[in-house]
């Protein structure tokens, strides 16, 4: 049932996921089907997409297994390497792997990196790119990341798109929800909100240090706001995430504040629910994209109309599963990962493992959510850019 191998890889296993490569299907594959967690709620009048996203896609190269970061002028060899679509692709992949019908509006170069990312997102992850564009004589944005002992260093290169994303978004299919950057362009998703879509907003670190509350004005168009504890307390001028989430609940129907290993807080004014969720205890390897995976889980839970406590726990679980792998979008869990975790936890609880039993008590709702049959999955953390000839040899 699992969706994931052990780690980012290079060499033969990775080359099998190069463009044009065919991966042999397991014997039971014909009996598996895609899993739609919203199937019982869908109606013929629903828009074609569950969630619409827009932003920059990067070609990410991640070096792993290093004892430390290199010093200036020094060359170190890494034990592992992987590559994947990054940037907004982290969120798009996370949403698609949870069964959300996901649309992405982005610009792609006409280089080999762009070819591979387009195929990976559209064909392997099933993301709708009908409103995205390939630009002639334009190269993909690229990020190189080095991870070592919980720290990382990055270098990025890219250029502005020849055409603004706002022009492409007008061609996008309708969606029930959108996840947006509060600091970005607001016109396109304000229009989406007027059409009835639920807008889930996030915001990044304010490098100016002003943390101006006026920056939160676009929340007037939003259904939810999901900042981390640092951002939330700075913008609300409060001294704890618990106080910050109450201040933000006055601005949006659904306020969520994440606090890393210290858990997450949420208030849903539309239902009157309040919730706190402790973090799932895991050994974190790479936190890249953890917030994106959390956001995707909250979108799914909200569209599925789950109670707030279940939404918060589910999103936290998805994030916890992601940080156990390297690679941003490649680390996003699928339903196989979630089912494996739940079964393993249940077995531990039955064997008298106190921590498993305690944790299981907060996740019993998964019994009615996880697939009850084999489903198609996505293999996590195994995509590495390679030549077509490499795929043929392996």
Image (tube, rainbow, N blue to C red):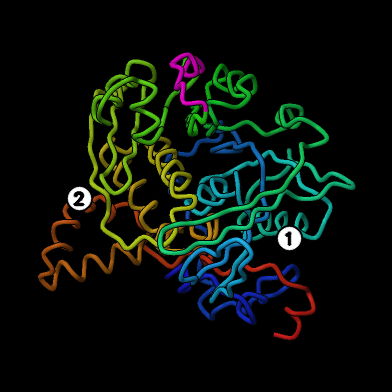
Instruction: Report the residue marked by disc 1.
Output: 116
Q: Are marks 2 and 1 in contact (CB under 8 Å)?
A: no
Instruction: Report the residue marked by disc 2.
Output: 362
| 211 within the magenta span | yes
Q: Specify few, some or many for label 1: CA neighbours under 10 Å numbering under 14, 14-19, or 20 or more.
A: many
User: Considering only order in the chain, which callout, 1 or 2, is on the residue closer to the N terminus?
Assistant: 1
Report the Cα–Cα distance between label 2 and label 1: 40 Å
The furthest residue to the bottom: 393
From the viewer's perspective, is residue 170 above or below residue 279? above
From the viewer's perspective, is residue 273 above or below residue 221? below
Instruction: Tell which of 54 and 34 is nearer to you.
Output: 54
Q: Specify few, some or many for label 2: CA neighbours under 10 Å numbering under 14, 14-19, or 20 or more.
A: some
| Magenta highlight range | 208-218
Residue 240 % position (x, y): 25, 30
Residue 23 % position (x, y): 64, 76
| 343 within the magenta span | no
Q: Pick the quarter of the image with the C terminus.
A: bottom right
Residue 126 % position (x, y): 62, 53
Q: Residue at x 54, y 45 (%)?
A: 91
* Left-right relation of 325 to 51: left
């Amino acid at each position: 049932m699992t969706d994931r191998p052990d780690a980012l890889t290079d060499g033969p296993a990775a080359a099998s996921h190069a463009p044009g490569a065919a991966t042999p299907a397991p014997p039971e594959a014909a009996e598996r089907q895609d899993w739609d967690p919203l199937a019982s709620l869908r109606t013929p009048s629903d828009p074609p997409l569950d969630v619409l996203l827009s932003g920059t896609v990067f070609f990410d190269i991640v070096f792993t297994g290093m004892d430390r970061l290199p010093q200036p002028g020094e060359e170190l060899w890494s034990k592992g390497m992987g590559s994947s679509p990054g940037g907004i692709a982290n969120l798009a992949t996370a949403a698609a792997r949870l069964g959300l019908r996901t649309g992405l509006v982005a610009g792609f170069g006409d280089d080999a990196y762009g070819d591979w990312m387009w195929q990976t997102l559209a064909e392997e992850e099933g993301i709708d790119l009908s409103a995205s564009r390939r630009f002639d004589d334009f190269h993909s944005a690229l990020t190189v990341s080095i991870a070592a002992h919980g720290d990382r260093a990055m270098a990025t290169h890219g250029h502005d798109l020849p055409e603004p994303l706002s022009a492409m978004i007008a061609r996008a299919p309708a969606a029930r929800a959108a996840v947006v950057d509060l600091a970005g362009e607001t016109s396109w998703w304000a229009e989406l909100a007027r059409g009835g879509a639920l807008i889930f907003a996030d915001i990044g670190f304010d490098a100016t240090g002003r943390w101006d509350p006026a920056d939160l004005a676009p929340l007037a168009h939003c259904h939810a706001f999901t900042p981390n504890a640092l951002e939330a307390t700075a913008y609300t001028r409060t001294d704890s995430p618990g106080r910050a989430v109450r201040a933000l609940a006055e601005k949006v129907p659904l306020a969520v504040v994440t606090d890393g290993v210290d858990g997450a807080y949420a208030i849903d004014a539309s239902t009157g629910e309040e919730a706190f969720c402790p973090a799932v205890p895991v050994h974190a390897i790479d936190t890249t994209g953890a917030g994106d995976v959390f956001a995707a889980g909250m979108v799914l839970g909200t569209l599925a109309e789950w109670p707030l406590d279940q939404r918060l726990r589910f999103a936290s679980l998805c994030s916890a599963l992601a940080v156990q792998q390297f690679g941003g979008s490649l680390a996003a869990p699928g339903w196989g990962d979630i089912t494996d975790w739940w079964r393993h936890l249940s077995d531990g609880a039955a064997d008298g493992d106190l921590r498993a039993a305690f944790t299981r008590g907060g996740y019993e709702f998964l019994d009615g959510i996880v697939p009850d049959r084999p489903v198609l999955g996505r293999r996590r953390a195994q995509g590495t850019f390679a030549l077509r000839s490499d795929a043929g040899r392996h």
